[in-house]
Amino acid sequence: MQGGQAACALRHGPALPGGGRRCASPPYAARRLAHVLPQFAEVVHAHGARAAWVAALAHRHRPFPLVFTAHNLIGRDLPSRLGIPFIGFHCVRVLAVSPSVGDSLAACGVPRAKIQVIPNGIDLGYFCTPELGRVAARKSLSVPESAFVVAAAARLSREKGLDTLLSAAGQRAGMTFLIAGDGPLRPALARSAPPNAKLLGRLADVRPLLAAADALVHNAGGLSCLEGFAVGTPVIGYACLPGHGHRNAEAMRDAGVAAHAETAEDLIEAIRRLAGTADGAAMAARARALFRIDPTLELLRLAKTAPVTVPRQRRTPVASRWAVRTAGISTVIPLTLGGLSFGVAQAAQHGYGVAEGGRAVYVAAELSHEQAANPAVVQALRRHRVSAVIGTGLNAPTPTDVALLFSSGIGVIGADRGSGRRDPRRQRDDIDLAAKAIADVTHEPQPPVLLLHHAGLVEHMVAWNNDFLLGYPERARGGEALPRLAPGTQLALDLRRRTAVQLIADLNALDAAVNAAHLPEQPMRVLWKAP
């Protein structure tokens, strides 16, 4: 990678990097990782204890900076008491998703100086893709478009209290309750479920469920709440677990981002008060504002911090032999290696920028070659103060088209639609082409690029190393319903297949929607420095 170090994210997955055979034990996986590591990265980030075992064993063969993220509480059993200190000893940093997880790591012997708490988060762009329309989501779940839908996603086990939710569902035949998840109580819950409740089982993709729901019910304040916040679905706590579940529900209620219902009557009243109403939209907006802070900034801050070193403790020969024996015992644990994702370990020194707006709606239109060369289209874009999104590939605007738009006073922005390639070099080339499509005309040192797809560590790395400033817009196709407009919305209209008359009608409809939302409209190009 150019301009910085690369990071390898190691998870429990199906195959070895580079297409190798499946591994049967951590020692074999560790030797393979130590062998292939120099080809991929200089920093390894292990997710989960089993992946960390492999990385720590590989560290003995070939030392490298190792970071371990613990996603669950660490037990007090013998393997944990012996294995976790071994992992912690080889790590420069141990990340915990909550203070309680951090406490459990410390209780197992990981030095407090190495532990850093970073709460769980989700990818906002992944949950806000344009194809997740309400109509399409309900169709995929076989739910009528006019139904009043209440959703829940949880493991179907006794502690989740879903029998209480089904009991409340039986009292309101006019609502449809969709429950996603699997577990030991599924047969019993299926027998007791009222006609208006449907058990969906385990879903590979929970986004359609959230997009189809008028309200989301939780009982613990877990990741499903964050996913509901991202989609914009009102979240309501009901029959919450004693302890952390109840505390989480009260904290979210006090913050104004979720409701809390103690009884079935309170639940129904909260659903009717929040689903499809101004109160519900305001609460969802407050919840979504939680995502304005990019957690990557915290990782960058940690990357700039010098690694924590802990003085080597004196070990007796018996303790050393036990460390080796513990590694040998783990050979019975089946393990495979996951795919690799890339990042930048010390990217802060290269600069980092994501275009953020104020209280306006920032608009850009994705154009074809024929549209960009049409004087009527150019005039319409200038009249409506809309920026032009310049993609690459067949039928994309040519450099001459870009120069015409630019000279007409229309701001131009590069667009990377994503190729679906897993090769980081190819992904980097895609973004380079998107930036070059406008940099040749505008001669900007920091060309703006819109990522019209899911953005991962590779995209961040390319931005850091090349001083690109990225934007993450909402997307909508011409002639289709617009997404919900809120202050700071970045909206990219795909107008490539629209005639000039249809394009002008789309821009008029957009103006009407922005005016109805009582928000000012700005060209998206103002989010970056003027050319």
Image (cartoon, helix red, strand yellow):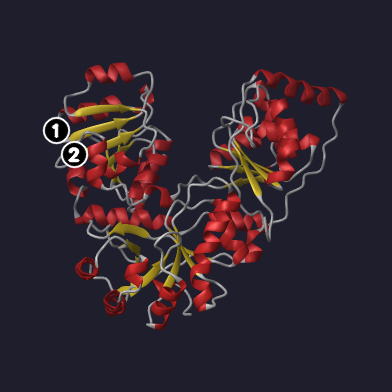
Residue under the image location 39 percent in, 77 percent down = 405
Q: Secondary structure at mark 1?
A: loop
Say if 468 sits above or below 318 in the image.
Answer: below
Tag 2 residue: 268
Q: Secondary structure at mark 2?
A: helix
Disc 2 packing (10 Å; few <14; some 14–19; many ≥20): some
Disc 1 packing (10 Å; few <14; some 14–19; many ≥20): few
Is label 2 in contact with label 1 (beta carbons under 8 Å)? yes
Residue under the image location 42 percent in, 57 percent down = 452
Nearer to us in this view, 198 or 134 = 134
Q: Give percent across and percent down for residue 221.
A: 39, 40
Tag 1 residue: 172
Q: Give percent across and percent down for residue 316.
A: 86, 27
Nearer to us in this view, 252 or 147 = 147
Residue 89 appears in the figure: no
Nearer to us in this view, 522 or 180 = 522
Question: Type of residue at label 1?
Answer: Arg
- Residue at the right extreme? 317
Residue under the image location 75 percent in, 36 percent down = 35
Q: Give percent across and percent down for residue 181.
A: 36, 28
- For the N terminus, the quadrant is bottom right
Decide if residue 496 is on the left or right side of residue 57: left
Q: Rounded to the nearest whole Å, what is the CA distance between mark 2 and mark 1?
A: 8 Å
* Residue 444 found in image quarter: bottom right
Picture disc at residue 102: none
